[in-house]
Structures are given as C-alpha cells and as structure tokens.
Amino acid sequence: MLRKVGAQIVPLLPRPGSRLFVITNPRIRELWGDRLGQSLAKEGLDFHFLEIEEGERYKTLSTVGALAEKLARLGADRSSLVIALGGGVVGDVAGFLAASYMRGVGCIQAPTTFLAQVDSSVGGKTGVNLKAGKNLLGAFQQPLAVFIDPEVLQSLPDRELRAGLFEAIKYGIIRDQKIFSYIEQYRERLLSRHPATLEHLIAECVRVKAQIVAVDEREAGLRRVLNFGHTLGHAFEAETGYKTLLHGEAVAWGMIGAVFIASLTARLKPVHANHMISAVLALGPLPRLEVSNHRIIKRLTSDKKAVGGAVHFVLPLRIGQVEVATGIPREAIVSALNEIRRLSGDL
C-alpha cells in the first residue's frame, strides 16, 4: 500500500501543486520513509519530512507548536496536506497539527503500528497530553484517507504487536463476539504475524469502529463504548509518566479493571469475567503496574470523560455488549485496583 500512496493522494489534493508534509519519527522514517517518499516522488508531488521524538511523553502542545513553526517557515498554506506516517503518537500529533494549523488543513493517516491500524488512525480524534492527563487538548477532524499497509507490521517489535492486539480484543468485548472468538482461535497466528490473519482482523476492527463513528462522530452517545479500558488506562499512563506502559498495555490493564468493576457491581457473571481476563492475559505479558489507589482515583475525576466530577466507566455485561455507567462506588474501584495489583505481581 505505501508504494501506491502517491497515486491515491493525487485526487485528494486541494489544488495542483499542493505541498505535502510528512510527520514521522526517526525510526519509522528509516524503515518506511523511502518507500513512501518514492511513491510521492513518482507522482511528482512536492513533499517534506518533519520528525518528532518517539514516545507518548512527546505527545505535547510544545511538539505541535514546534511543528507548526516549521510549517510556517517552509511556506505551508491552506492548500497543504499533512501526512501522518507512524503509530498512535504520530497520528494524534499530526492530526492535531492539521486540525489547528491555519484553522485546519487536510490530513492523511498512514499508520505503521498494529494499534494505530485497528484503532487510532480511524475516527478523526486528534490530541495531545497535558500534565493533568491524557488527550485533554484536541480536536475532531476526520482524515481525508487512511492508508493501511499490513506489510509494515513485519518490522514491528513484538511488544508493540501485542499492544495492538489488546486494543483489537476490545472490539470483541464491546461489540462483536466474532472478533473475540477469532482472536482466541487464531492467537498464535496473530502473534506470529500471519499476513492474511492480521489483515482480516484489521479489516474487522476498522469495520466496527467505522460503524460506530458513523453513528456518533463526536462521542455524544454510542461512541463512548470505544473507551472500554481507557478510563483507568489513561490514568495508569499519566501516573507512570508515559514511560512504563505502551498505550495498548495501559488499555489492557484498564479493561481488566473494568471487568473486575462489572463483576463487583453484579453486572457481569464471574464465569464471563474470568473468560475475558484470561483472553486478555493470553495475548502476552503486561508490565508490572505499581500505582497508588488514591492518585489513580484523583486522576479519574480529571479525565476528559468525567462530567461534573462524575466518572464514566464502560463496563461489560457479556462478550459483545457493554454499558456506560456512572456512580460506581469508590470501594469497587479500589477493589479493582487491588486485584490489578495482585495480578500484576503474579505475572
């Protein structure tokens, strides 16, 4: 797909001669920059590469500001396009840059991680982190196109592949039991990067997310189910300084916590809770999580999904169905955090 991106972009240009600005990081540029660049050059397109540092801790307003200054110096105008070549951090930063530069220029997503391919590149959410929490500054802006090339996953580190699988199993729990069963049945093929198996799973996850976003683009209702695992997951990421957990790993711990809460509040039968937790843990080891209950609960109230201090949790009722719940007793959250800590110590 990256070899064909140039030809696919030409019809999307706001005008002939529009300039393209590829946002990426040094590792991804070294791996895939030439392939994309050759595709763009083949079509005679005017493009520049701009690099950011790798890692969630660089997903900040200062990074966006530095990129915007570079765009201005290079003469980017309202007919320019931003291309995000990378994982979720690159996609979020480049998307927010596109949404805000000159009050909005077009953006194209070319995700290179499994997590970005199954989730973050689709749906139009962009944003950066603040010290107070994750993704507290952002905008909704749908990309002009998302180009997914499963071939790039062959160079992905094992840990990042598993992080994407954690995000993928989310779709099975919230919406489609077939996805959950597919991941269980073909877990070894997925972990060994069997191309057709990966491609099928990517397509199914994108299908589910696109259906949800089409109904509720700006998260006024249905789209909130996509936050399963993210309420606690974002708190875990922020509390550990975005240095200990990959996003998918934080979501995995967050999903496990949500399952415990659902079970503790009698929403979920223990047999189903155990099945979900076992399926998540079977996808691979998770980093040890050592966080303060008090600090995590404090962060929950500052999460962007909290309204008037009321924390919203997406809780499973069974595989394939969830509900958005508020008014969860503090003791249930504490008990879930204690269970996560116990599991974390046992891994």
Image: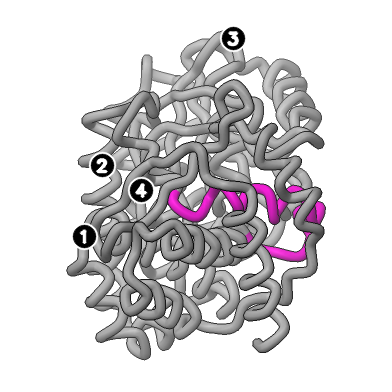
Q: Is residue 161 above or below residue 1?
A: below
Residue 205: mark:
none
Which residue type carries mark 3? Met
Residue toward you, 53 or 309? 309
* Earlier residue among tags 4 and 2: 4
Nearer mark to the viewer, of 1 and 3? 1
Tell me whether the residue at label 2 lies in contact with that at label 3, contact meaning CB atoms closer than 8 angstroms. no
- Which is nearer the N-term, disc 1 or disc 3? 3
- Identify which residue, 201 or 327, lies in the foreground: 327
Residue underneath mark 2: 210
User: Quick one: SS at disc 2?
Assistant: helix
The magenta span reads: 228-246
253 horizontally vs 134: left or right: left
Q: Say the numbered circle drawn on residue 102.
A: 3
Q: Residues within 10 Å of mark 2 (few under 14, many from 20)?
A: some
Where residue 27 sits: x, y (%)?
68, 62
Gap in Å between the C-alphas at discs 1 and 3?
40 Å
Question: Nearer the N terminus, badge 3 or badge 4?
Answer: 3
Q: Position of residue 310 (x, y in %)?
A: 57, 31
Image quadrant for the C terminus? bottom right
The residue tagged 4 is: 147
In this view, 241 is above or below 200: above
In magenta stretch: residue 239? yes
Q: Nearer the viewer, mark 1 or mark 4?
A: 1
